[in-house]
Amino acid sequence: MKKRIISGLSIWIFMVVILSSSTAILETEEFTARVLSGGMQYTESVKKIKITIDSYLTDEEVLNLIGLMSQQGYQAFMDAFRALNKGIFFPIGGRGIKIIIHGAHSIPTEKGRQILLFTSRQSWDVEMNPRTDPRFGFMVVELNVDNKGKGTGKIYEQASIQLTPQRTIVMDGYNSPPKQLWDVRLSK
């Protein structure tokens, strides 16, 4: 009887360890992509970017942001938004620039999924210095990938966002044309 209990318990512990470690592995995703960026006058260069997504926003996190925005105002919302860390976006060879992703959603589509990444507006391209509009204080990265993790995407460098009653964050509008991402691949 003791042997059965011990073997059953050890199998149960083994399964918990395996399932918890595989869940942690599945949560982190790494994408690579290429973007055509404008450099100096009459020149353009192709830059490679790497995006690591550690986790996605939960309903509770979005509900907390909605509550902060409605009860305490914009600054409390921005403080809580900037405190979220869902991953990293960085151009490879970008002179040490690393942008923290504060929000991430994965939305299923017919052929795969759409991934939306949100962060505060930042200049990620050291060769560009665009004009900014204070109404568009966020940067949104949109990835459209198929079931194999391949696809395209866009970077909206100056965007506005909206918190929805469905407990999601969506892009409300943008000020500058998006930069096109191609050769988007899930690498990990």
Image (tube, helix red, strand yellow):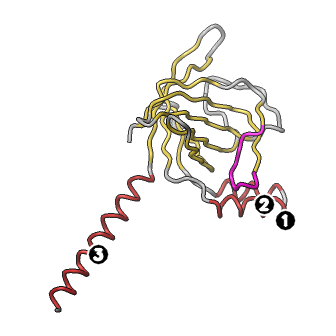
Question: To which residue does mark 1 refer?
Answer: 71
Residue extent of the magenta highlight: 164-172
Q: How many marks?
A: 3
Residue contact between numbered discs 3 and 2, judged by CB atoms under 8 Å: no
Position of 34 with respect to 173 (left or right) is left
Element under disc 2: helix
Q: Nearer the viewer, residue 67 or 134?
A: 67
Element under disc 1: helix
Q: Is residue 65 magenta?
A: no
The x and y percentages for residue 115 are 57, 41
Estimate the spatial distance between the alpha carbons at disc 3 and disc 1, rounded to whole Å: 44 Å
Q: Residue at x 50, y 37 (%)?
A: 112
Query: What's the residue type where badge 2 is placed?
Result: Ala
Residue 123 sits in quarter? top right
Image height of 1 relative to 71, above or below:
below
Estimate the spatial distance between the alpha carbons at disc 3 and disc 2, rounded to whole Å: 42 Å
Q: Is residue 170 magenta?
A: yes
Position of 2 with respect to 163 (left or right) is left
Element under disc 3: helix
Residue 147 sits in quarter? top left
Question: To which residue does mark 2 refer?
Answer: 76
Question: To which residue does mark 3 refer?
Answer: 13
Q: Residues within 10 Å of mark 1 (few under 14, many from 20)?
A: few
Position of 85 with respect to 72 (left or right) is left
Residue contact between numbered discs 2 and 1, judged by CB atoms under 8 Å: yes
